[in-house]
Amino acid sequence: MNLFSETIEQSHIPADGEASVLDMLRCARCGRDLVADVVLAGDAACPYCGNLFRQPAYRRIEAIVDSGSFIEIERETEAGDPLSFPGYRTKLEKERVKSKMQEGVVIGKATIKGQRTALAVMDSYFMMGSMGTVVGEKIVILAEFALTNRLPLVIFCASGGARMQEGVLSLMQMSRTTIALARHSAAGLLHINVLTHPTTGGVTASFAMQGDITLAEPGALIGFAGPRVIEQTMRDKLPEGFQTAEYLDEHGFVDRIVERRDMRETLASLLALHNAGQTCSSQREAH
Amino acid sequence: MTSIKQNLAIDTLPNAADPAWASVMSARKEDRPQARDYIEKLFHGVFEVRGDQCMGDDEAIVSAVAWFETYPVTIIGQQKGHTLEERMRCNFGMPSPEGYRKSMRALKQAEKFHRPVICLVDTPGAFCGVEAEAKGQGRVIAEHLRAMAMVKTPCISIIIGEGGSGGALALSLADRLIMLENSYFSVISPEGAASILFKDSSMASEAAKNLKLTAGDLKRFGIVDSVIREPEGYSRVHMDESVEAVKKAIRNALKRLTTLPPDRLVEQRQQKYLNMRWYG
C-alpha cells in the first residue's frame, strides 16, 4: 500500500473467522516469524529489528502504570445491537472471544511514577478499536470521572474510526466525547493523547486531536480518511510515508514521537510538570 | 471512516418501498435546494464572510452575516453547487480544512456579537485528499466540534441534503437539530458501507436501509428535534412551502433559545448530548 505497510506489521490483523490473533506473527520489516504470545506479552516489538506491533490494551497498561495501581472502571459494559445491524451480534461475540476484551477501550485510574491520572487505552484487537456507543460512553464516563476527581487524563488512541454497525449513533460519540473533554479542559485539567497505530476516522476527528499534548508512537498510521479511501478518491499513488506519525510531526500536528520504551518516563514527567502547576496556582490562591 | 465515494446513480428513481435509499437519492438530486437557495429565501441583508484568513477561501462552505426576520444572525452553510462549474468550485460540497477554519471564524464572531448561528448542512463528507490530510482535516473537524460545543450563542443546525459523516457532524452539534424529510445523516456513505459489508458498492440501497440514516430514524433516536415535510417534487424552483416551515422552525427555536443566559444555553446543549445513551 505504502511505506507504512512495510514498517508496521499488518498481516497479523485478524481476518474474520480466524481462530486466534495470538498465534504467529510475521515481522513486516525483517520478515521473521515470531510467536505472538511471547511478543505481545512483552513490549510488542520485534526482538530482531525493533519493529512495533499493535499492543493489547492490558499489556500496555501494565507497561505504563505503577505496578498494582490500575483500577478499572466500567469493565463489564458491553455493546448491544441498537440498529439490529446484520451480522453485528455474531461479530461482537467473535471479537470478545478472540480478543478476551468486552469492548475496544479500557478505562480506569492509576499512578505513573507516583503521578495520579485517569487513563483510557484503546485496543485495536477488538474490532479495530472502532468507536461505537460503548467506546464513546466509556470515554465520556472517564472524562467526567477525571473532572470530578480533578485528575489529568491520558488517552492511548487506536481506532479505525467510528463503528459502522452502530451507524449514526457511533457518529454522535464524536460529539459526546468532544463535550465531555471540553468540560474537563475548561476546568484547567490536562489531557494528553498518545496516538498509536492506527488512529483514523471519527476518533482522529474528535478526541484524538483535542489534547493539550499530542504524543505518537513511531510509524503509527494517523489520519482522517484511510489511505485506501484517499487512493480511490485521488486515483493516484500516495506520497511515501504519508499519514505516518513522522509525517504528522513534520506537518505540525504532533508534539513528540516517543519510543514505546520511553513512554512511561515521558508521561510521568509531563504529569509531574502539570500537577506542579496546579499546586503552585492553588498555593498562590491561598495567599 | 468516511468514504465519500459519490456514486451518483441519479437515474435510479426513488422507491417508496425503499425509503432509506429514496432519501439518499433525493438528498443528492441536482435540483434539490442547496444552502445558497435557502440563504436567498430565508434571510435578507446578507453580507458574505469569506476566507479563513490563513490559507484561502473554500467555497464548499459559505458563511455570512444577515437578518433573519428581526434577528441578526450568522449563517454557515455547505454548498455543493448546481452547475458543473459551480460544483467544481465548491469541490462538490466537500469542505477542506480552510472551509472549517472559515466557519470557526464565523462562530467566534457570532459569539462576540451575540448573534445566533444557523447552520445548513449538506455534504457527502469532508474532503479526503492528500492536501486535506496534510493541512489537518481530522484536527480541524475536532476543533470545530469543540467550538460548537462551547460557543456561547444559540446554534440551530438544519440538515437540508446530505449529512455525510464527520464532515457534516462538524456543523451539527447544536442546540436544535432539524432535518428535511428527504435528507439523510450517516456515519458512512451507503456505497462505502456496501463495499465493506457486501464487497459490492452497488448494494448501496441495501446498506442504506441497515444504516438507519433517514430523518425518521434520527427522530426516533432522539438526535433530531424536528423533521420538516417536503412537498412532492421538492426542488429549488418549488421550495416555498418548505421554506415557510423552515422559517417557522427557526423562529420558534430562536424565541426560546435567545431568552436563555449564555451559560445555561451551553450547559443545556452539552447535557442534551451527554444524556444520549443507547448502549446495552
Image (cartoon, coloured by chain):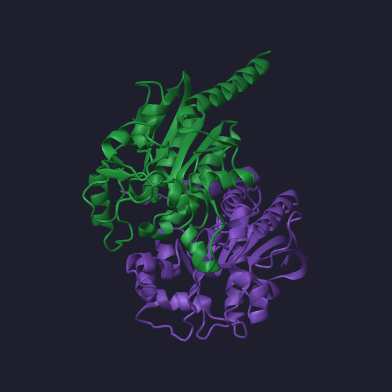
In percent of width and height, residue B203 lies at: 36, 75
- Placement of A62 over or under B83, stated as above or below: above
| Residue A145 shown left or right of residue A18 in the figure | right
In percent of width and height, residue B231 lies at: 52, 82
Q: Colour of chain A?
A: green
Q: Between B91 and A107, which is closer to the camera in this rendering?
A: B91
Q: Between B212 and B137, which is closer to the camera in this rendering?
A: B137
Residue pictured at 61% horizontal, 58% vertical: B132
In percent of width and height, residue B61 lies at: 66, 65
Total marks in image? 0
| Residue B41 shown left or right of residue A153 in the figure | right
* Occupied quadrant, residue A60: top left
- Placement of B81 over or under A105, stated as above or below: below
Q: Between A260 and B262, which is closer to the camera in this rendering?
A: A260
Q: Is residue A253 visible?
A: no
In percent of width and height, residue B229 lies at: 50, 75
Q: Colour of chain B?
A: purple
